């Protein structure tokens, strides 16, 4: 139990943390505390170094606005219109936000005998180069309204968080996430949360990060449950991941060392990073940043560690969207430009077997070559690894595993059930214009109610409301139409990867 408690402050809800006194805001029974530092600013001597605990402050610290975001560039057009990515200037980017149920007397911890409210910690996506906790879609009000203490986290991105250098620790962005989770364990009681009932959840690169946290000995015991949205265990070797850093060094004409990069102006570094990494996507590839097997945060590939029983005691919910690839392919016109010859070339480059591709083509005779390529690539990246992960946990006797698929089709640009579309449903933020940029104005509220409630139930009890994974391969489908449990969806395509 934390020694830190709620405390009265003038003109707002107050909480005393290990670092000092905070003042937030409260509205309709939900308190918000924004921009709370969990570690020191990663600048100066701390740049390209592991996070150091935040320093204490005197008096009352205002926690009424989002803190600085990690150095980054906006999404390139046309994705910038679909994925709002606000930037908040400042150095103290290692900060987090908390939304909590709040009564007139202070935090609502559920009453005697409850032990505190369930806690959910959100780790945003963005290919490890975009995103932040200030994205409006991630507003935690609905979770707090429904009895959850919601925490969202910023962490270092790009070369600052995932560069590979001979003179600096690797996986700094992951180390930031571990530092944030440690802060939550030590302080969340003061906000009415139960530090023994923490669920970490994330999407895309955030879900890949969580898979690494599940495998990391440094994160053991920091959370009880996990949700992976459109992400699966993934990591590169140090040597493979170093190539992006080296390409960036060549463009900057500096040595590929942290010492040299620390002397580069941050804006120049960002411009070079965008030039090196901005020409690809998760399907077609190009230089990118990756979580790496560093022998410390990750002693081995997370897939191998998890298959060997790491985090077997952690309850798991994971899933994908039916048309993940369309966010990466459709806005840029790839579905139209990729013909049969280009499809075959890209399949060879991606080392996807012609036998597997034949099964997909046979089952999708009306789809264009670019569309079939997109489904194949997204399945290889996401759906197939998640199925393998679920099978390994089942065969190893791990805690319950639940799978879902989000299938409601957005009318915007014919994106259908694309990557990231489920976010506004999970957070129940369909009314926000930033959410409607991807969903359009008429997204089904009942589906958001059901999906959001499933996430809340999982955080509260470890059961989202449907049968856990077993040999029949049950998957809860959220749309089109009402949620429905389906056994072994698209099984012929999945089986094709087994040969």
Image (cartoon, rainbow, N blue to C red):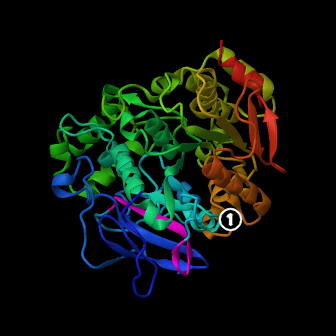
Q: Tell me the residue that label 1 is attached to.
A: 430
Which residue reaches farthest top?
Answer: 499
For this rendering, which residue is in front, 286 or 99? 99
For this rendering, which residue is in front, 301 or 264? 301
Q: How many numbered discs?
A: 1
Q: In the rendering, at what x and y percent does residue 371 appear?
A: 69, 36
Task: Quarter of the image for the N terminus: give it.
Answer: bottom left
Residue 207 drawn in magenta: no
Secondary-structure class at tag 1: loop
- Magenta stretch, residue numbers: 93-107
Asked if residue 216 shows in the view, the reply is yes
Q: In the rendering, at what x and y percent does residue 474 appear?
A: 76, 33
Displayed quadrant of residue 229: top right
Which residue reaches farthest front?
Answer: 113
Q: In the rendering, at what x and y percent does residue 425 appear?
A: 68, 57
Residue 101 drawn in magenta: yes
In the rendered view, would you say 114 is above or below 28? above
* Residue occupying image coordinates x 72% and y 51%: 414
């Amino acid at each position: 139990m934390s020694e830190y408690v709620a405390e009265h402050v003038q003109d707002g809800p107050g909480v005393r943390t290990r670092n000092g006194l905070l003042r937030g805001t409260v509205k309709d029974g939900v308190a918000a505390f924004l921009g709370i530092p969990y570690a020191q600013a990663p600048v100066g001597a701390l740049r390209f170094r592991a996070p150091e605990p935040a320093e204490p402050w005197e008096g009352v610290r205002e926690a009424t606005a989002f803190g600085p975001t990690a150095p980054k560039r906006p999404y390139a057009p046309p994705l910038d219109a679909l994925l709002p990515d606000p930037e908040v200037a400042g150095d103290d980017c290692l900060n987090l936000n908390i939304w909590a149920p709040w009564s007139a007397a202070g935090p609502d911890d559920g009453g005697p005998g409850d032990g505190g409210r369930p806690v959910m910690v959100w780790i945003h996506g963005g290919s490890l180069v975009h995103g932040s906790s200030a994205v409006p879609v991630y507003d935690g009000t609905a979770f707090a309204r429904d009895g959850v203490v919601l925490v969202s986290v910023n962490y270092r991105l790009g070369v600052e968080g995932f560069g590979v250098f001979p003179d600096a620790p690797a996986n700094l962005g992951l180390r930031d996430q571990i530092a944030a989770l440690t802060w939550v364990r030590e302080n969340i009681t003061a906000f009415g949360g139960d530090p023994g009932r923490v669920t970490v959840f994330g999407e895309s690169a955030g879900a890949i990060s969580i898979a690494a946290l599940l495998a990391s000995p440094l994160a053991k015991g920091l959370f009880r449950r996990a949700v992976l949205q459109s992400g699966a265990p993934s990591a590169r070797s140090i040597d493979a991941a170093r190539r992006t850093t080296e390409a960036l060094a060549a463009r900057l004409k500096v040595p590929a060392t942290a010492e040299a990069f620390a002397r580069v102006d941050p804006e120049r570094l960002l411009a070079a990073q965008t030039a090196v990494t901005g020409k690809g996507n998760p399907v077609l590839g190009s230089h990118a940043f990756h979580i790496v097997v560093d022998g410390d945060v990750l002693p081995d590939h997370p897939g191998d560690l998890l298959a060997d029983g790491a985090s077997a005691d952690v309850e798991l919910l994971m899933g994908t969207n039916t048309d993940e690839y369309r966010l990466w392919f459709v806005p840029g016109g790839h579905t139209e430009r990729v013909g049969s010859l280009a499809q075959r070339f890209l399949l060879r480059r991606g080392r996807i077997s012609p036998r597997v591709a034949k099964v997909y083509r046979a089952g999708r005779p009306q789809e264009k070559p670019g569309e079939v390529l997109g489904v194949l690539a997204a399945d290889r990246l996401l759906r197939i690894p998640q199925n393998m992960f679920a099978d390994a946990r089942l065969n190893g006797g791990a805690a319950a595993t639940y799978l879902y698929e989000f299938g409601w089709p957005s009318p915007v640009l014919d994106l259908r059930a694309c990557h990231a579309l489920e976010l506004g449903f999970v957070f129940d933020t369909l009314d926000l214009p930033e959410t409607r940029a991807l969903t359009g104005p008429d997204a089904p509220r009942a589906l958001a109610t059901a999906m959001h409630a499933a996430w809340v139930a999982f955080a509260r009890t470890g059961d989202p409301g449907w049968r856990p994974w077993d040999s029949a391969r049950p998957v809860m489908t959220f749309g089109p139409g009402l949620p429905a449990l389906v056994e072994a969806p698209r099984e012929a395509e999945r089986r094709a990867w087994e040969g």
